[in-house]
Amino acid sequence: MNLSGKKILIGITGGIAAYKALELIRMYKRAGAEVKAVLTDNALEFVTPLTVQTLTTNKVYINNFDTSNYSPEHISLCDWSDIFVIAPATANTIAKIANGICDNLLTSLALAYTKPFLIAPAMNCNMYNNTITQENISKLKNKGYNFVEPETGYLACGAEGTGRLADLNTIYLRTVELLNPIKILSGKKVLITAGGTVEKIDPVRYISNFSSGKMGLALANCANNMGADVTLISTFKADVSYKNIVVQSAEEMLSAVKSEMDRNDCIIMAAAVADWKIKNYNQQKVKKTDADNWNIELVKNPDILKTICNIRQNNTPIIVGFSAESENLLENAEKKIKNKGCDYIIANDISKQNSGFGSDYNEVYIIDRNLNKIFIEHAPKEIIAKSIMETIFEQAGTNIKVGSVCS
Ligand code: PMT
């Protein structure tokens, strides 16, 4: 596999498997990549800077306070590289990264790094199995860090168990995969709605809800990263490179969705559409009077999801709704999928702390027409979006595998 033009930053920490990082560097170099290495002080107990420098044909980076470069190393190395691979990663370094500790150059880089990140743990099996290490790993996975799991077998310390650095070919292939994300939705057209609709009372006042649009936007960005041709219909202007139609009310959203639906393979209704609108919109600002009450009459808004499910032909496109519930989550979501006639419903409990409306996180059930359920645990909306896209398209008969790569 050709890695020419790719720039790999490899982090080596202090474990016996550090010597294997030398061969990994050679594999990257043989594939044409440029490699720079950053070592912790403990790594120096296992490999020498001279060996690493000779293999990378680059300077070796060890501490935060090198004065030979005017730019701070932890920033310039982030800018320079396309991916950061830590192999081997000790329990200590994983714990530091999971907790935002940056007391050496490698961990400072980790905290500042915003591009693809790959961690290959290697340690004693009891250290690996310890719930503290496992919690640190899950925390990082939930934040989007990629891991190559260690292998099970005889360890250098004499114990037998899980903790041996993964096979170098596996680490190498995962690196290649992350550097060249497969566009698994290429050729597919996906329409996503996002945000809370606004139902105007008069030129000054309106009824809306707490939707920030983050869930819908995460889905649209994920579909775009997976190679889909995306249309986002939102109640806010999104700073995106794909098509964005901005609407305000449920009626406007309905007409935009109807006019776009036939050209799409999949529609995901993540928008929080107001169920009610004002019966008589006031053209002028309603003046405050001496009365203590103001009764506003509301009438039902169209149900966009139900409408498009009813008018589609031959069950095309695939239609996915959301179900925002504050009680009886699964029971209500099951009623909704039946009543609206969509193919999937994504049930989220909006009463949970740090989840649902406005939050960067969510926790959902993906429910299909047969009421099969997949639970996606509490995670950033980007991760939830990736699981939703992969599940739906895998089940819809494409070649997508759950857990495959989305940049
Ligand atoms: O936007 P965020 O702050 O990130 O929050 C995310 C979210 C909580 C808004 C999102 O995850 C979510 O649950 N979106 C759907 C909210 C909603 O309107 O749920 P509902 O249970 O009331 O509606 C069920 C489905 O019918 C939804 O797909 C909705 O888009 C659709 N609907 C509802 C009413 C209506 N008149 N027309 C519709 O199409």
Image (tube, rainbow, N blue to C red):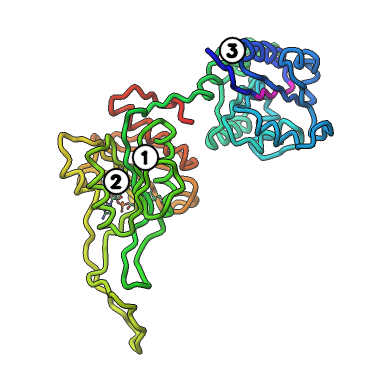
- Residue 58 within the segment the image draws in magenta: no
In x, y percent, where is residue 173?
A: 53, 16
User: First in sequence: mark 3 or mark 2?
Assistant: 3
Q: Main secondary structure of the magenta part?
A: strand
| Most foreground residue, 127 or 286 | 286
Residue behind label 2 places its C-beta within 8 angstroms of ligand 1: no
Which numbered circle lies on residue 31?
A: 3
The kind of residue on which mark 2 rests is Ala
Q: CA distance from mark 3 to mark 2?
A: 50 Å
Q: Where is residue 198 shown, x and y percent of the image? A: 34, 62
Please report the residue visible at 28 percent of the width from the left and 49 percent of the height from the top: 332
Is residue 123 in view from this perspective?
no
Q: Secondary structure at mark 3?
A: loop
Q: Position of residue 193 (x, y in %)?
A: 34, 47
Q: Is residue 12 magenta?
A: yes
Location of mark 2 (residue): 333
Using the rendered view, name the quadrant where residue 341 is placed: top left
Q: Which residue is found at the position 63% from the left and 13% from the top?
A: 160
Name above or below for residue 274 compared with residue 107: below
Q: Please tell me whether mark 3 or mark 1 is closer to you in this view.
A: 3
The residue drawn where x is 29% and y is 46% is: 333
Identify the mark nearer the N-term, 2 or 1.
Answer: 2
Checking the image for residue 365, the label placed there is 1
**Label 2 to label 1, Cα distance in Å?**
9 Å
Q: Which residues are magenta?
A: 9-14
